[in-house]
Image (tube, helix red, strand yellow):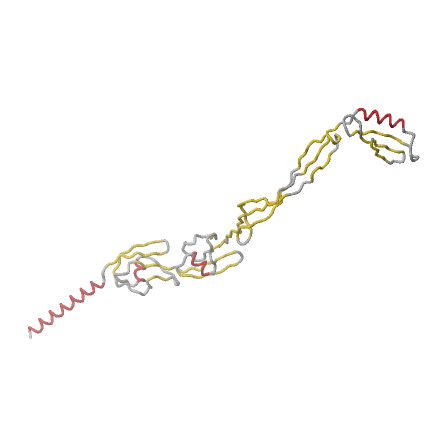
Amino acid sequence: MMKKSVLRIVLLLTLVAAITVSFAACSKEVTVKIYDKSENTEITVKTNQTIADILAEAGIELNEKDESEPALDEKLGEDVTEITVKRYAKVTVIKGTETTEVELVGGTVEDAVKQAGIELSDEDELSVDKGAYLEDGMEITVTAIEYKTETRTEAIKFETKEENDSSILKGESVVKQEGVDGEKEITVKVKYINGEKDSEEIISEKVSKEPVDEIIAYGTKQKTSSSSSSSTSSSSSSSSSSSSGKQVVSKEAFPNCDDGSHGYYEIHYDDGSVEYVEY
């Protein structure tokens, strides 16, 4: 009888030791890193605890809609060394006149923009860095940037040049050549912000039509004294004569060469008419 009692005690102690060893084996210490957006926490905890208990032990509080990975009700195992806290956020995405509200758990600014149905180009700009974590109530403004290459035609204004002409009397001028505008093709890189033109940069220019200069000739020819004397004598000698009954009021000679050998007379009559006669 005594032997049976001793045997039972030995078996009981063996069972308790086995349970203790088994429990110890299932409750090892593990160092876990907890990522809560930009904040990182490192904590050493026993395995076989729930993720919720570990977060509470680390002093990290979760709101009603926040989540974690692994899930809060899962137990920590030896192979789990990281816990990620996913925060709930309701944000507003604005592009031009369009406003979209987005709700996410554990997302970035880029995630929110994508959920709003907006495709970002490499040139588009955001009011918040696209890799930033979302904050509840955040406003994200998307500025659409687009570059286009455009070509237009512009006028090249003609220049006006002046020259002297000895065949024209001093004080008079003649347009010897009419000016004509040219044309050039300009290629520009245009920047559009939300569909509106913002700025442009000239890439190249090419003349497609050369302009034609305007040329104005100014007279340098002097009136000769002989023409004045001949004009006076002609005027006095013929002041009272007229082939058609009109009286000559004045007659002035205008030579076309320096020696006065030929030119023309300008004759004024008493009826107001003027006649030009070559000589």
> Would you say 165 lies left or right of 149 here?
right
Q: Measured along the vertical axis of the image, is residue 134 above or below residue 279? A: below
Residue found at x 11% / y 72%: 8
> Would you say 77 lies left or right of 195 here?
left
Q: Quadrant of residue 227?
A: top right
- Residue 39, percent from left and from top: 35, 53
**Residue at the far bottom in the pictured view:** 1
Between residue 274 and residue 7, name the one nearer to us. Answer: 274
Q: Quadrant of residue 221?
A: top right
Q: Measured along the vertical axis of the image, is residue 224 above or below residue 10? A: above
Q: How many marks?
A: 0
**Residue at the far left in the pictured view:** 2
- Residue 21, percent from left and from top: 18, 64
> Would you say 15 lies left or right of 90 here?
left
Q: Tell me the quarter of the image containing the C terminus.
A: top right
Between residue 228 and residue 32, name the one nearer to us. Answer: 228
Q: Quadrant of residue 87?
A: bottom left
Between residue 176 and residue 39, name the one nearer to us. Answer: 176
**Residue at the far right in the pictured view:** 245
> Would you say 235 lies left or right of 95 here?
right
Residue found at x 40% / y 55%: 133
- Residue 141, percent from left and from top: 48, 54
- Residue 246, percent from left and from top: 91, 34
